[in-house]
Image (tube, rainbow, N blue to C red):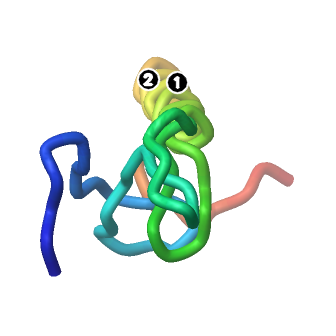
Amino acid sequence: MHLRSDDKIIFCYSCNSMTIYHHRDTHGNSYVDSHCDECGFMEWQNRAVEREKEKWITFNIEKGIEPNSTKRNA
């Protein structure tokens, strides 16, 4: 696997694995938005998921909810 200078390896929330994100389309043109090599999930979508995850973690900490808690409010 060869990484070009504009490639990066990041966690893809769609694939649930570390994958290559690159700026090339199927013809090798480099003007497209960065996307997952495996599933095509866009990098901006991935960042949005990360921001939402961080908001929920902060919210849960402020409310005193433990991570991975399985108890539900009745």
Q: Residue furthest top?
A: 62
Residue positioned 52% across, 24% down in the render: 55
Q: Amino acid at mark 2?
A: Thr
Residue positioned 50% across, 27% down in the render: 51
Residue 28's image quarter? bottom left
Residue positioned 23% across, 50% down in the render: 8
Q: Secondary structure at mark 1?
A: helix
Residue on which disc 2 sits: 58
Q: Nearer the viewer, mark 2 or mark 1?
A: 1
The span from disc 2 to disc 1 (Cα, nearest Å) is 5 Å
The answer to whether residue 25 is visible is: yes
Residue 56's image quarter? top right
Instruction: Give residue 12's position: percent from left, percent from top.
Output: 44, 60
In contact (CB < 8 Å): disc 2 and disc 1: yes
Residue 7 vs residue 58: left or right? Answer: left
The answer to whether residue 56 is visible is: no
**Quadrant, the N terminus:** bottom left
Instruction: Give residue 42's position: percent from left, percent from top.
Output: 59, 46
- Front residue (pair 66, 37): 37
Q: Is residue 52 above or below residue 2?
A: above
Residue on which disc 1 sits: 55
- Which mark is on residue 39? none
Q: Is residue 66 above or below residue 48?
A: below
